[in-house]
Image (tube, rainbow, N blue to C red):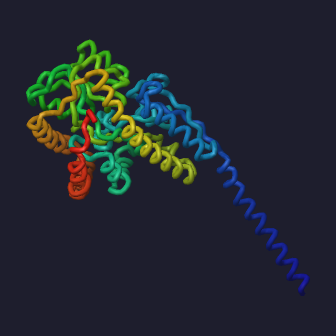
């Protein structure tokens, strides 16, 4: 009897080992599978933080996945046009890309809220909305019909107001002004009487220098110095009311992303978040020194927008946001979420950040 029981147990154990091997084999094979992707960007080659951020994402993802995902990064125009990124990812021409939501407003109007909102949230506010306030879920909902999955990828921090070939004294100075400015901020400028155009970064300086446009915004001192805008326009205005914390995106073809094992999806999300934080740190670290150089070396006229102008722009921004939100249900849904979250964090921001910066502001000056 004992011999029969021993043989029975031995047979059952052998069967269990065989079954476990059968189940485990596909898992091992899946873990060994590698993916070779293409990423296209809206940025020129070697553009700091923007293009180098895309390359950093690819490098860090390959490291984090132990080589299971390898990405070849293509700058604007190398594989697709600068503003063709969204379509290329959507139709599966490439697996992923980087850009800014407001570039795709013609396809998905609600996408504008996920890049920047005039007089909206600062970098920590918009990241809080994405990660803790439901913003990312809405973003996914907006992009889903296009077969695209978005993730926050970079953040420029608070931007500058832009470069102008003439002094801006009153709101009437926007009338007839030809300005390169994207997104909802561009619609505000248009409502103020300006003529708005959207140019990829590679065309901005030449257009400003030749007078094709009268003004441009880009990002902030770190990049504006590199772009040489001070050679084409005399006046450098602040603050960047139109883009107080611009979020940029990395987007994935939805079918490709969802076909990945869950661990790789999670790794992609984590690396995107890491690069998002890295980019903001890079801007914060570099903008101060670049601004000093623009002022002291290149004698740039640093100008603050007049208070009455800012109040009018704030009013026009409110009108634009309500008008744009009323155009389609998805924009309305996103706008209401953004507006509610802004009000929620604004109370805390007033007694925390605002009060703190007002306290220390007298201790800092551009000349110190």
Q: Is residue 81 left or right of residue 125?
A: right
Q: Quadrant of the rendered structure where residue 286 is?
A: top left
**Residue 10, percent from left and from top:** 84, 74
Residue at image coords 21%, 54%:
350
Residue at image coords 20%, 33%:
187
**Residue 17, percent from left and from top:** 78, 66
Residue 329 seen in the figure: no
**Residue 193, percent from left and from top:** 12, 27
Q: Is residue 113 left or right of residue 303?
A: right
In the image, residue 54 above or below residue 130: above
Q: Nearer the viewer, residue 37 or 57?
A: 57
The quadrant the N terminus occupies is bottom right
Residue 245 seen in the figure: yes
Q: Is residue 305 left or right of residue 296?
A: left
**Which residue is the extreme one toward the top?**
210
The quadrant the C terminus occupies is top left
In the image, residue 356 above or below residue 310: below
**Residue 204, percent from left and from top:** 31, 21
* Mark count: 0
Q: Quadrant of the rendered structure where residue 16 is?
A: bottom right
In the image, residue 129 above or below residue 255: below
**Which residue is the extreme one toward the bottom?**
1
Residue at image coords 33%, 41%:
157
Q: Nearer the viewer, residue 265 or 194?
A: 194
């Amino acid at each position: 009897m004992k011999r029969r029981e021993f043989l029975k147990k031995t047979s059952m154990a052998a069967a269990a080992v065989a079954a476990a091997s059968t189940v485990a084999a596909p898992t091992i094979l899946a873990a060994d599978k590698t993916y070779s992707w293409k990423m296209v960007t809206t940025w020129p080659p070697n553009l700091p933080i923007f293009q180098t951020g895309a390359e950093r994402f690819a490098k860090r993802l390959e490291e984090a996945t132990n080589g299971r995902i390898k990405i070849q990064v293509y700058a604007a125009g190398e594989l697709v046009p600068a503003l063709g990124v969204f379509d290329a990812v959507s139709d599966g021409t490439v697996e992923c890309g980087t850009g800014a939501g407001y570039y795709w407003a013609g396809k998905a109007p609600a996408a504008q809220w996920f890049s920047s909102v005039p007089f909206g949230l600062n970098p920590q506010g918009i990241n809080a909305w994405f990660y803790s306030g439901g913003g990312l879920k809405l973003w996914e909902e907006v992009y889903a019909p296009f077969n695209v999955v978005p993730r926050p990828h970079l953040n420029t921090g608070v931007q500058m107001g832009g470069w102008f070939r003439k002094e801006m004294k009153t709101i009437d100075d926007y009338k007839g002004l030809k300005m390169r400015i994207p997104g909802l901020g561009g619609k505000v400028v248009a409502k103020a009487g300006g003529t708005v155009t959207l140019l990829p970064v590679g065309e901005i300086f030449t257009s400003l220098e030749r007078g094709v446009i009268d003004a441009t915004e880009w990002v902030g001192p770190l990049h504006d110095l590199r772009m040489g805008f001070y050679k084409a326009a005399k006046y450098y205005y602040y603050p960047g009311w139109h883009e107080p914390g611009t979020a940029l995106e990395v987007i994935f073809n939805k079918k490709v992303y969802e076909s990945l094992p869950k661990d790789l999806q999670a790794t992609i999300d984590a690396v995107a978040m890491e690069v998002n934080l890295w980019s903001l740190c890079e801007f914060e670290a570099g903008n101060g020194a670049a601004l000093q150089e623009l002022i002291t070396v290149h004698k740039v006229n640093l100008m603050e927008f007049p208070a009455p102008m800012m109040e009018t722009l704030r009013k026009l921004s409110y009108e634009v946001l309500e008008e744009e939100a009323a155009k389609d249900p998805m924009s309305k849904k996103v706008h209401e979420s953004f507006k509610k979250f802004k009000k929620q964090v604004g109370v805390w921001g007033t007694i925390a950040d605002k009060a703190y910066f007002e306290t220390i502001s007298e201790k800092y000056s551009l000349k110190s």
